[in-house]
Amino acid sequence: MIARLLAAALLLAGLSAPAASQEPAASAAIATGENTGAWVHAVTLMGSPKYGAGFTHFDYADPKAPKGGLVRLGSQGGFDSFNLVVSGLKGDVEGGIAQIYDTLTTESLDEPFTSYGLLAEAIRVAPDLGSVSYRLREGARWHDGKPVTPEDVIWSFEAFKANSPLYAAYYQNVAKAEATGSREVTFTFSETGNRELPQIVGQLRVLPKHWWTGKDAQGRARNVAETTLEPPLGSGPYRLARFEAGRTATYERVEDYWGKDLPVNAGRNNFGTIRFEYFRDASVLVEALKGDLYDFRVENIARNWATAYDDFPAVKEGRLVKEEFPDRGTGIMQAFVFNLRKDRFKDERVRRALNLAMNFEEMNRALFYGLYRRIDSYFFGSELASSGLPEGEERLILEGLKDKVPARVFTEPYRNPVSDTPEAVRTNLREAVRLLREAGYELRDGRMVNKQTGEPLAFEILFAQGVFERVVLPYAASLKQIGITATPRIIDQGQYQNRVRAFDFDAIIHSWGESLSPGNEQRDHWGSAAADRQGSSNVAGIKDPGIDALIERVIFAKDRPGLVAATRALDRVLLAHNYVVPQWAAGVSRTLRWNRFAHPATLPAYGGSGFPTTWWYDEALAAKTGAPR
């Protein structure tokens, strides 16, 4: 589900995920595969929800948590827009703006598949999964005091679908949204049996129609299809108080927030002020943290974790805390990604050769202090990752598509090359050259060239973060040993985003995060229809009928075992095509924070540290560490 991915992104950025709620008047929650058409307080993809209609708070939240205090969050780059609708397509949206809005429902962070009402007091799913209705809470209101209405929901849905390629793909099977009561909105689907559609519609972030269709202070009509730096109206727990474009944005807790007393809001949204500070690159972010210019950092650079902090006085004194939190339940693929729209990358043998040339073991030793593991799945680190040879239901799924998937998925488990000895390095490079010769290339004067045209096998690796240069250069050096020229090219963040959106690159470093409940977003990741849709997450340009069929098997899986089997089959086929050169992952979230904050004894099962969603400002700790500036 995209919601879990967005929630993870918000947590990494230091954002609070939207709070959920329940309504005791609604009946017990049901699994979407066992619907009776009754109004319920929560829906789950399978089994029963952890929290019944009468629960008081999430286990990972402390309802007695104090409110107030300042937390400062650091981010790389800048921003020039507060419009979420065109995020990822136009401009750079400010990282905290999502928290001014509410959604119809929200997932708890200690369940992988359950959605509870937030704006919606109750949910009704049709028995055939052909529609879903939401009954809005009577007290839900915008920060200007006006009520949240079905018209707001419908307008928001249509705005996202019309102006965002991501949401157009995500909601492509939602045929219409209509008001079916004074506080009721119904979404009708173009298909039945899609277990995920009722829940992904609930993830819709609802915007105020009356504000976006109105005029600004200068009398100009607002346009939801364009970027804007006008602070938007929201309904959520925070409002944008002030900002300096591209540099800082400050959010203040809404004291009369309509949903503050809902059970699942207990112990959440505790900070009085959340301030985002922007810095130009990763190295500046490290120094800014040491300078106490922001409070919390997820350290994704192994060298920094190993060497940049331990001798820092604040760490030795306990004022700056280094702590690892487990990453549970979500998968990731980070990789060198090749643009399959370019002829030089269309041959699978070429792509496999590019993988054989990468010496991960040496990079892990020399650059990463042995802190990483090689990624070998698009769902790495989760139960959805394929392994060994296909068995049971997974094999049956693949056999049903035998003419559309590589034959080797039945006989050869996917394995990354291992270059842990000099002989292994030589063996891998020899195999890479053999595959390239099979694909129509040969070595001439130390360069790998096309036998027929004489064109060198050369490409550019595009990136925007300077820290990537240290991993691109060793890879380029390995490729040079077999006559391939890979040229690193660093450009600014804005140019990079525009070129990736337009698929104007040879190769990039890219990552896809996955939830424990993959669904419609897989069409945008790997589906043929997304390959030529600018702004989609199918940056590789994958077009494959077998993969398209497997995506549909994932989306329409009827139960958890079926979902796991279909996802493993999809993973296996993606790997077999060698679309990318997988990189590495840590398996933990490595964090640093100035010691001013406390958290509940129980942390979210699927939310890492949970910072800052359920944390709070601790006056006693802050007195020892010093108050933030």
Image: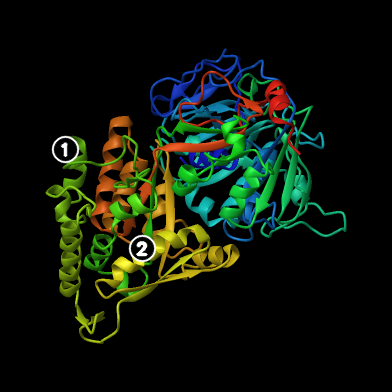
Residue in front for this viewpoint, 74 or 237 = 74
Q: Nearer the viewer, mark 1 or mark 2?
A: 2
Q: Is residue 354 above or below residue 238?
A: below
Q: Check the image and name the residue furthest to the top.
A: 54
Residue positioned 36% across, 44% down in the render: 372
Residue positioned 45% across, 22% down in the render: 30
The circle drawn on residue 537 is: none
10 Å crowding of disc 1: few (<14), some (14-19), many (20+): some
Residue 153 in picture, x, y percent from top left: 65, 40
Q: Disc 1 or 2, which lies upstream in sequence? A: 1
Q: Is residue 231 above or below residue 67?
A: below
Residue 343 in picture, x, y percent from top left: 32, 75
The image's colour scheme reads: rainbow
Quadrant of the frame with the C terminus? top right
Residue 328 in picture, x, y percent from top left: 41, 32
The answer to whether residue 234 of the structure is visible from this angle is yes
Residue in front for this viewpoint, 176 or 112 = 112
The answer to whether residue 520 of the structure is visible from this angle is no
The circle drawn on residue 474 is: 2
Distance from the alpha carbon under mark 1 to that under mark 2: 38 Å
10 Å crowding of disc 2: few (<14), some (14-19), many (20+): some
Quadrant of the frame with the N terminus? top left
Q: Judge from the rendering whether residue 131 lies leftward or rightward of residue 214; answer left or right.
A: left
Mark 1 — residue? 391
- The kind of residue on which mark 1 rests is Glu
Residue positioned 38% across, 37% down in the render: 193
Residue positioned 32% across, 58% down in the render: 581
Residue in front for this viewpoint, 140 or 306 = 306
- The kind of residue on which mark 2 rests is Pro
